[in-house]
Image (cartoon, helix red, strand yellow):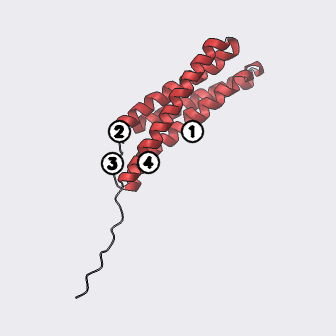
Amino acid sequence: MESFTTGFLRASLLWLVTGASLGVAMAMHPAWAIYRTAHLHLLLLGFVTMMISGVAYHVFPRFSATPLFSPRLARAHLVLANVGVAAMAIGFGWRLHDPTPGGLILGAGATASAAGAYLLAWNLWMTLNRAAQPVTRIAARPG
């Protein structure tokens, strides 16, 4: 498996543990429910999206019988996605206590996450474009 694929899968598991831990903390301390938006993003962007990305980067080249369009873009996506999720979680929490820096951090994290999603979409789209085209039979010329 490619290093970026295992990077996404391992990161997804770390985000799962982080999001679940925040969920337990919110259950134990109801006042912490104000952090539910960070909790949701840790699980949805962190766990679910990272898991889907890792599996997609592994499966698409195999299903399309062609190499991934750009492993370099996949590595950039891994960095952007993880920095984005971390910044968003921090930004959501910080914004509750100090809106200006918290909002800036949140916006930067959201931008990084979106950029990573765009890289994923482009990379997989281009991989599919490079996939082997079906062979068409050429009819023999008469006579």
Q: Marks 3 and 4, how far apart in space?
A: 12 Å
Name the quarter where the C terminus is drawn.
bottom left
Is 16 placed above or below 63 here? above
Q: Which residue is mark 3?
A: 67
Graded by Cα atoms within 10 Å as few (under 14), some (14 to 19) or many (20 or more), the crowding at tag 4 reads: some
Which residue does the image show at 39% across and 33% down from the upper left?
75
Q: Which residue is mark 2?
A: 71
Q: In the image, what residue type sits under mark 4?
A: Trp
Q: Marks 2 and 4, how far apart in space?
A: 13 Å
Q: In the image, what residue type sits under mark 2?
A: Pro
In terms of sequence position, does the residue under pointer 2 or pointer 1 come before the other?
Answer: 1
Image x and y of residue 79, in percent? 44, 28
Which residue does the image show at 41% across and 55% down from the upper left?
63
Could you tell me which secondary element the residue under label 4 belongs to? helix
Q: Nearer the viewer, residue 125 or 67?
A: 125
Q: Which residue is mark 1?
A: 48
Q: Marks 2 and 1, how far apart in space?
A: 21 Å
**Nearest to viewer (mark 3 / mark 1):** 3
Furthest-right residue in this view:
30
Residue 43 relative to residue 97: left or right: left
Graded by Cα atoms within 10 Å as few (under 14), some (14 to 19) or many (20 or more), the crowding at tag 2 reads: some
Q: Which mark is residue 125?
A: 4
Q: Nearer the viewer, residue 101 or 140?
A: 140
